[in-house]
Image (cartoon, rainbow, N blue to C red):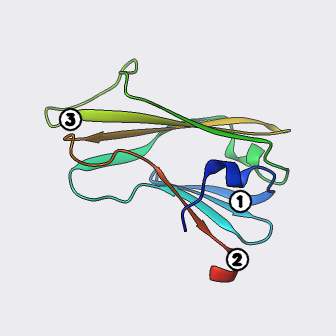
Amino acid sequence: MHATIQDMIGRIFVSVENKDNTELIFTDKDGNIFTFYHDQDCCEDVYIADITGELGDLVGTVLTFADISTSNEAQPHQETDEWTESFTWTFYKFATIKGWVDVRWFGTSNGYYSEGVDLMYKGAEDV
């Protein structure tokens, strides 16, 4: 089931895992799982470009802030190729009392495919 980033606020996560820069998986203390990912179709590439902060700061204490923003503006040192017609930056910001974490995703395509990041929720009862 799809979720919104706001559904994560107030939860205590026991793990946050960056899986090959293609998925970011949050598991809360009740066994619920929130997965950020891109459902690959054909002619696009979406991945985690970088993470500022420590994912460990999001573990073991209440998530107090979660926000998303996007941009289609070129970033410094951005690399594209001759097949890139479109690109999207997606920025996620998370915070606990331990610190802030910013996750920057980058998506490119030929202009016909999604460059967005999806958030899937799987309840403990569904695992």
For discs 1 and 3, the disc positioned in front in the rendered view: 3
Classify 85 as above or below 127.
Answer: above
| Pointers 2 and 3 in contact (C-beta within 8 Å) | no
Q: Amino acid at mark 1?
A: Ser
Q: Say which residue label 1 marks.
A: 15
The residue that appears at 20% across and 33% down in the rendered structure is 85
Mark 1 or mark 2, which has the lower sequence index?
Answer: 1
Q: Say which residue label 3 marks.
A: 84
Residue in front for this viewpoint, 67 or 19:
67
Separation of disc 1 and disc 2 at Cα?
Answer: 14 Å
Q: Choose top left, top right, bottom left or bottom right for residue 122.
A: bottom right
The residue that appears at 63% across and 81% down in the rendered structure is 126
Is residue 127 visible in this depiction of the protein?
no
Q: Amino acid at mark 3?
A: Thr
Local packing at callout 1 (Cα closer than 10 Å; few below 14, some 14-19, many 20+) is: some
Mark 1 or mark 3, which has the lower sequence index?
Answer: 1
* Residue 124, numbered label: 2
| Pointers 1 and 3 in contact (C-beta within 8 Å) | no
| Pointers 1 and 2 in contact (C-beta within 8 Å) | no
Is residue 112 visible in this depiction of the protein?
yes
Residue in front for this viewpoint, 112 or 55:
112
* x then y, percent, for residue 23: 50, 56
Separation of disc 1 and disc 3 at Cα?
Answer: 35 Å
Q: Choose top left, top right, bottom left or bottom right for residue 78.
A: top left
Q: Choose top left, top right, bottom left or bottom right for residue 27.
A: bottom right
For discs 1 and 2, the disc positioned in front in the rendered view: 2
Looking at the rendered image, the quarter that the N terminus falls into is bottom right
